[in-house]
Image (tube, rainbow, N blue to C red):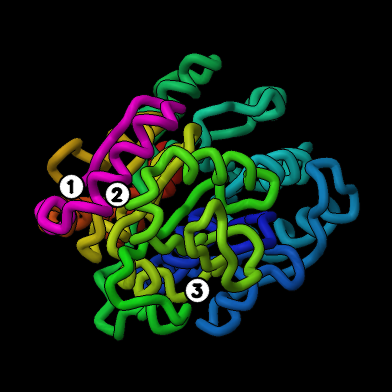
Amino acid sequence: MLHVDTGRTWRGGQRQLLLLAGGLRADGIEPLVVAPPASLLLHRLKAEGLASASFPMRSGMNLLAIRRLRRLLATWRPHVVHAHDPRAHALLDAALLGRRRRATFLVVTQRATSIPRRTFRTSARVARFVAISSVVRDALVAAGVTDDRITVVYPGVPAAATGPRRDWRAECDWPHTLVVAGVVGPLTEARHHAELEVLIARLPASTRDHLGLVLLGGPASGRTAVQGVRVMRAGFVHDVQQALAGLDLLLHPGDAEGLGTAVIEAMAAGVPTVAYDTGGIAEIVAHERNGLLVPPRDVAAFAVATTRLVEDAALRSTLAAGGPARARQFDAAHMIAATLAVYRDLIERSAV
């Protein structure tokens, strides 16, 4: 199996690929993962002793990257090549062009609910699309991909961590009475700072006084304040489970999420979520049972739901109790087995 991921940061897609590669090796299948130089995924692969290759992949038409992929295809001779993002899809599609020596199946993971046009300019050679939720599958179908070429494989999370939870109050020197909320999604990025300010401004003064925000993503620049609320810009964290477990609640103000593995991992740790009812989030969160859902892009409603959880410890506890059982349905072993079933189905069909 040859996997290609062109991301340089550490997000949900890279974490899923690392889990998948480790699971395949444990099942006796040797994966080779191609990633950009200095990518965080590359460092983690090397740390875990997983086979990797690295070269720049700055665009889907990078001729040098395409030539290097063609060499890897010739030497590694994979049964399946798996693109984990749109740029990897374009590169592998070009690298496979004219390849006749043996059948190599192209699998493409689609994570977003918005489908790039180039996905369909280069989709003819795709043997199977892996959609991370039913919402993503529906977007692929609406864009013209036949249902028989799509398999839904939900992302997986590892078993709940047994190590110590990160003590954000101690790290940030915040009062022990403060309610700590993690923020994931686009509002952690600098270019969305104004949107974060708008959301915080909608919170009552009493809520802002008792709230600390940890931005999990975007640039890591330490402690600051936004609209009078204490904020820690933690950046992308490696100890995801411990980082999420140290929160009192998770805020997911994103409106185009294919699924949202951070929400699943928060549930596994007993941390309730406030999120927009959009994308694949509703396939995870059951409103008033393990989290709170609000109408898409309704900032006022999001602020009201956040205030409810900040000010009502009993509600946080009730919703937290409903999370772990739901999270277990997204175990990493299920994701690995379902992905492997896709590979085997393609190979077995070709042998008939």
Q: Secondary structure at mark 1?
A: loop
Q: Which three-letter amino acid code belongs to the residue tagged 3?
A: His
Q: CA distance from mark 2 to mark 1?
A: 7 Å
Q: Which residue is mark 1?
A: 290
Q: Which residue is mark 2?
A: 273
Left or right of 25, for residue 41: right
Of label 3 and label 2, which has the lower sequence position? Answer: 3
Q: Is residue 246 magenta?
A: no
Q: Which three-letter amino acid code belongs to the residue tagged 2?
A: Thr
Left or right of 26, for residue 113: right
Q: Secondary structure at mark 2?
A: strand
Q: Can see residue 315?
A: yes
Q: Can see residue 34?
A: no
Q: Residue at x 19, y 38 (%)?
A: 286
Q: Nearer the viewer, mark 3 or mark 1?
A: 1
Q: Which three-letter amino acid code belongs to the residue tagged 1?
A: Asn
Binning the other alpha carbons within 10 Å of mark 2 as few (below 14), some (14 to 19) or many (20 upward) gives many
Is 190 situated above or below 254?
A: below
Q: Residue at x 73, y 42 (%)?
A: 96
Q: Quadrant of residue 351?
A: top left
Most foreground residue, 316 or 273 = 316
Determine which of the numbered discs, if any, sits on residue 238 in the image. 3
Q: Secondary structure at mark 3?
A: loop
Q: CA distance from mark 3 to mark 1?
A: 25 Å
For the N terminus, give its image quadrant: bottom right
Provide the residue span drawn in magenta.
290-318
* Location of residue 160 in the rendering, given as x and y in whole percent from the top left corner: 25, 71
Q: Is residue 306 magenta?
A: yes
Is 317 situated above or below 43?
A: above
Q: Residue at x 40, y 43 (%)?
A: 203
Mark 3 and mark 2 in contact? Answer it, CB < 8 Å.
no
